[in-house]
Amino acid sequence: RKEVEQDPGPFNVPEGATVAFNCTYSNSASQSFFWYRQDCRKEPKLLMSVYSSGNEDGRFTAQLNRASQYISLLIRDSKLSDSATYLCVVNPRANQGGKLIFGQGTELSVKP
Amino acid sequence: DTGVSQNPRHKITKRGQNVTFRCDPISEHNRLYWYRQTLGQGPEFLTYFQNEAQLEKSRLLSDRFSAERPKGSFSTLEIQRTEQGDSAMYLCASSSGVSSYNSPLHFGNGTRLTVT
């Protein structure tokens, strides 16, 4: 089993749609979780950290379910500019500052 | 510019040659990471440093790969006897490492390696 798994997509949605991505991780001791965004042929950039209680940043909502070992990202009112690959990132161990493992990414395409 | 800087941006080399890439992290960041990314995949962890200490190296990484961060500032990644399978984007990232959990990574633009 991979340490971090995502649905590769692609997700093709119309503008204004709500879309949700899920990501599962294998180590129940994992403590740090992030969502990154990567545009075509660019470097990944932090979208948001994921906190235990869930957190929201504008149209974006991140949730953590420790019991089921998955995190989710919800995008409301999709914009054309949201088209990108979304990467789930997890520290697979409980220690501070260790390696961060990326999922394979979920591609989103928002159409007019 | 205070972001992560990587050089060169592109490298084309023949199979069997050695290549070296450089990464200059954000100056106050003490953690530095190397990742490799191929088309359609997420970044794959290679190694990371805390200051000058290399704390972890991926078991998937062959002995042809070596990384250094001699003074805890810039880092180099060397690939010896390159193979066509080494063709990829090599990404460097840094983080501050001051919180009790992982701090987010800040990536450079990457070095795209093509082995012919």
Image (cartoon, rainbow, N blue to C red):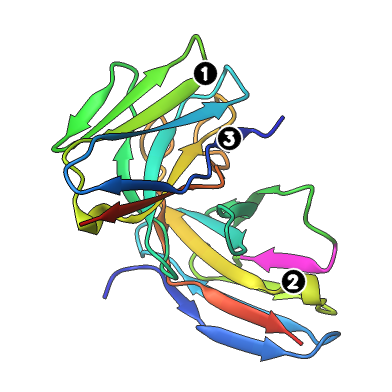
Check contact, mark 2 vs mark 3: CB within 8 A. no
Vertical placement of residue A40 versus B28, above or below: below
Image x and y of residue A81, in percent: 22, 58
Residue A50 picture quarter: top left
* Residue type indicated by callout 2: Asp
**What is the quadrant of the C terminus of chain B in the image?**
bottom right
| Left or right of B66, for residue B74 | left
Give the crowd class for mark 3: few <14, some 14-19, many >=20 residues within 10 Å.
many
Vertical placement of residue A10 versus B28, above or below: above
Which labelled disc corresponds to residue A44? none
Same chain for the residues at labels 2 and 3, yes or no? no
Give the crowd class for mark 1: few <14, some 14-19, many >=20 residues within 10 Å.
some
Which labelled disc corresponds to residue A5? 3
Q: Nearer the viewer, mark 2 or mark 3?
A: 3
Tell me the residue at 50%/72% (across/down): B110
* Residue type indicated by callout 1: Gln
First-in-chain label (3 vs 1): 3
Of helix, strand and loop, which one carries label 2? helix
| Chain that bears disc 3 | A
Which labelled disc corresponds to residue B86? 2
| Distance from Cα at disc 3 to Cα at disc 1 | 11 Å
